[in-house]
Amino acid sequence: MNRDVSSRRRFLTLGLSAGAAFAGGLVGCRDSKKEPSRPDGGGSAAQEAGAGPLPQGIDLEKWNRIKGEPYRRGSFGLMPGACALPGPQAKRNWPDRDKYKDVETIPGMCQLCSTVCGIVGYVKDGRLIKVEGNPKDPNSRGHLCARGQAALNHLYHPERLLYPLKRVGARGEGRWKRISWDEALDEIAEKLKAVRQSGHPEEFAFHQGRQRSKDALKRFLDAFGTSTQLSHRSLCSGNRRAANLSYLWESDWDLNDVEHSKYILNFGSNAFEAHQGHVPFANRIQNGRFRNGAKLVTFDVRLSNTAGSSDEWFAPFPGTDGAVALAMGHTILSENRHDESFLETWTNVSIEELRELYEPYTADWAERISGVPASDIRRIAREFAGAAPAATTMCNRGSSAHINGFYNDRAINLLNALVGSVGQKGGWCWSPWGGLDPVVQTPPMPPAAQTTSILEDPPEYPLANVWRRMRVGEIVYLYLLQGRARLQAYMTYNLDSPVTWPEESLTQQVLGDESLIEFHVCINAFYNETAHFADIVLPWTTYLERWDLDARASYNLRPYVGLRTPMIEPLGESRDVRDFFPELARRIGGGMEKWYPEQDVRDYMQQWAAAVPENPQTGKSGLDRLLDEGVWESDLEPFYQPFLRPLSAEDMEGSEVDSGGVILKDGHGIGIMLDGKPVRGFKTPSRKFEIRSAFIHKIGRNEDCSELIARSGMPRTKNRPAEHRGHDVEISEMPTWFLPREMEDLADDELIMTSFKWNVHNHGRTMNLKWLAEIVHSNPAWLNPKTAHQLGLGDGDWVELTSYYSRELEHRSPHLKRADLVEERGRRKVATMRVPIVTMEGIHPQALAMSNSCGHTHYTSVAQAKRTPAKTAGHLVGSDSQKFVDADWERNMWWEDTSSGDHSDWTPNTGNGWNQNRLIPIAPDPVSGQQSYHDTVISIRKL
Amino acid sequence: MVVAGSAAAAAEPSEAAVHSDKFQPESFWKDRMQAPEDGKKLGWFIDTRRCFGCHACEVSCKSENDVPLGNFIRQTIYQDEGEYPKVARMFLPMSCQHCEDAPCIKACPCGALHKESGGTVAIDYNTCCGHGTCVDVCPYGAIYMDPVAKQAVKCHNCYHRTELGMEPACVPTCPSEALHFGDLNDPESEINRAMNEAREADVELTQLRPEKQTRPRMWFAGPAAEVIEERIPKEGESYSPDAYSIFNWKGGKEREAST
């Protein structure tokens, strides 16, 4: 064997100083028959004093004794994480100095959360070896979070779905056989054809969990002719969007210009761990703080990482963010720290009306309700106003995923108007581009389907669909169970509703019931809980193996276009919808096929991206430019103070000005007169920032709002349809606030359960990724130590939690009819669950916090924290675990729970946690339909 | 204890000192302690004021280097400080400190540990045969023994990337721009820019366990280094998955009280 010359030289220079006590197994000693004179080559055994000189040199004998069995490999070779270190004298270099030589760099966009950061994939010999952020992405600017960095786990996974599956046995039994794509598409086409022929195309529902291929989905569903296009939006951001829309109409998403701020006032956003726009936003917050001197103050029931890093943290009683915000507004107005000019010019209320509105909302009032000291409320309000206009609020589900969430966010957003930071640099901004720069246009799309379904547009929720289609996802299974709708066919796409929807057992009950959902096709890259209740499962490509043009609302306040492109050939038989929807459409026929001319996906992308302008340096344009750089950003001016933009003479041609100064053209509002000059104004009925929203009040009562809509110039906004008659909801025109009544008289053993996300997980789709699951796989419930002590609980104790239905909703939403829930202690019981607690100083004493994302029952062995798949994992016929052997997982996984359900035997930080959604009731905000995740009353009992 | 500059903390000599009883004779390691000269002085600046513990650096490192589960080249340790309602959370991103006077090089019995150009402390895998003495003497717990290959692994400054003009895998991914790496001899380098910016803002730059006198090439800004110092692994230890357990996020006082 080869001898390493330098080691030998070292050996020889030692010479006699090593002495006779030299151990055997030195350089070249495999040939030697000498037994070692020491039992151990040195290693970690402590040296005794005076034991003689230390051993020296390469000890091959020891290494041969201690080395592990080489990793088992499938035909794919070593999987990510299985490091083939060479062993001494193996003459291989590690780290591999040639790793990045002759490598292809391919642009893409992450999809492991909703932020969609631009990425670059390094591909060598057809294998993706690393994923990083794309520095050219104008939003994320090259940064990529832990989720995005786990891309290789997502792509190369021993239990990834690679072949179509068809159910054998009963639904939910988990028995499957592998079928061909031909067979699968034939059967699906037959079923969907039948739905069309039944005259009820709306009984085919498509349900996405997270989609970034809107054009592909809309094309298929509109060509089919069903509007039952369901989503998860109301579980996420319905209220946040509705609150923004009520003020702006033009945008449902505030883009806080934090990089240029001096004061960032955060109510319930955890931007350092989650938030749509997470990486772009968090990066800019830190820049604002450390380069621009901005102060970050966070209100959150629980000490999130954002709260924990903030300059100040306050924990309001759950759901009282709006009260605190109103009290801040009261301080600002009563101390005359408001921006009089902005309020008088650009809002549709007078200062007098505002003072009247705020009068009862004093800091002392807010202290009684929220527990936040009045002196702090006033102080923070003064600081905020003092920093304006470079001051902005920020908020998210912490403030809005409540039964009173719409009003919480209305109150918070209003602060920006009070101090005049609306649209200002460093202030509270927005843009009309929530996605792709409109310069790129898809090939012609079919006309929108015109069906109605109670599942897509429940008549009880006034604000769910009037501006944008947000829908009320969390009522779907309940309404099916109540017989208010039926589904002949259900197609799910990247959805894990049994884990992510409230009331896990109801969701599973409905999904498993063939009389409620006759036929279920699941499209996913992995066998998750949804797939478990399907009839046919189709293996979907990952985001690293497909095409899209994609973009998100940019914090640069101007639009861009990003490209998702296959970095490698799709594994196994996985296919994207862009690839198989055309085939499915042609098999269904009946006119669908005309929206799918023969064209490969790349050609379609070429057409779509055609208008991307040329880069003068490279000469590339359109798709070529995107393939080269990954992203193109427009050079439009950032969308600051858009309401001041003057209207041109051309704009004004044929227009008329009404008595209120509103400029109308062809009956639609286009602007407003400002000091005798025509400007764009806000795209609302009053052309101002609508503090008083006549629209939301009238629409709540099913009144005709055509005139208001016309003046706004936002034709997308619609009256509520005829099916909504009789479902009136009182919505206050002006910002207001109320406390859900179930919070009012909590017993000593009752707490409010709040939810949260982890920085290494998204909601329900990342627990199968081993590098992320290693960091977080368990979710004990957080409890304040003083509360724990009062309840006789210690750190790590197990408790039984019982959740209760909202009394507020029993009162306001009788149509939900939860009379099936057993009455107990004056509340209706939803579910119980046993979990351990962890005592944490960082939580309100009356709250209990559990994360989502844990407690999977399927979704691969990784999500279940099981070293080996269960023997009954029948779905594995759809994977290729022989090819993609992950020996690192098999050998090195360390967090399996070995307690067999015995709590006293449970080792902390083992197992895969508990699904909080077992406890959370279906609880839509009566105004918008936003699911409440942070209001659940629970009782707690020591086990 | 963490102290700026060179003053050592008042600690028992046997605790403070590196475990020199395991060192090889100087003649054995002297050459390997000398980095090949290329004019560069590579170092790290970790701005813990910015870090919000997202673990992107750790997962990027796992992905780049095929780090086995249960082992870590890089690990971020969390700690909550304070009592409700005044609580904060600190984050300390940890990795090999690339000591100028590296005890691992001195202790390595087979001569695998050495310096690459710029001062990167690295391991020669043709030689490393699993003695593990490096783990015994590292004051920062930065080395692990690969569970299958039984060879020592630690941060190598991603020299396979930097040689090609790339950055170490953890640096560009960091969403909060808390990690800075580069040539301290280059006045225009990004690391110098970041350290100067911190100095101009009157922010103290500290080092970990200076009483060990290993002259680490890593500086920290922010209070996390001092607060979390006692939880950093010590001689004979490696980064452990236990650091991620939420039961260990608590401050030392609370942990005591609850046991």
Image (spheres, helix red, strand yellow):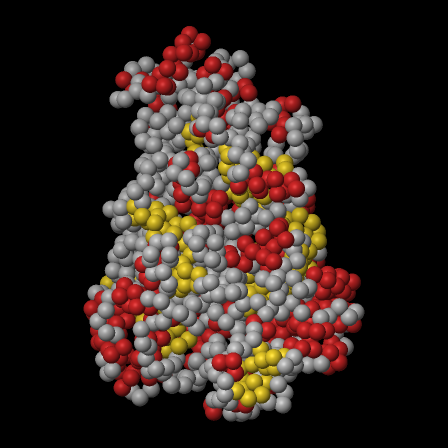
Q: Position of residue B196 (x, y in %)?
A: 61, 40
Foreground residue among A816 and A260:
A260
Left or right, A889 with respect to B256, comes to: left
Foreground residue among B168 and A49:
B168
The residue located at (45%, 63%) in the rendering is A634
The residue located at (27%, 46%) in the rendering is A125
Q: Position of residue A99 (x, y in %)?
A: 34, 40
- Which quarter of the rendering shows the C terminus of chain A? bottom right
Q: Position of residue B34 (x, y in %)?
A: 47, 22
Foreground residue among B233 and A670:
A670
Left or right, A441 with respect to A634, comes to: left
The residue located at (49%, 44%) in the rendering is B171
- Which quarter of the rendering shows the N terminus of chain A? top left
- A373 up-or-down from A645: above or below: above
Left or right, A628 with respect to A776, comes to: left
Residue A250 seen in the current view = yes
Q: Position of residue A156 (x, y in %)?
A: 33, 51
Q: Find the residue positioned furthest to the top.
A: A16
- B250 up-or-down from A344: above or below: above
Residue A301 seen in the current view = no
Left or right, A177 with respect to A9, comes to: left
Q: What number of labels is visible?
A: 0
- A874 up-or-down from A333: above or below: above
The residue located at (35%, 35%) in the rendering is A97
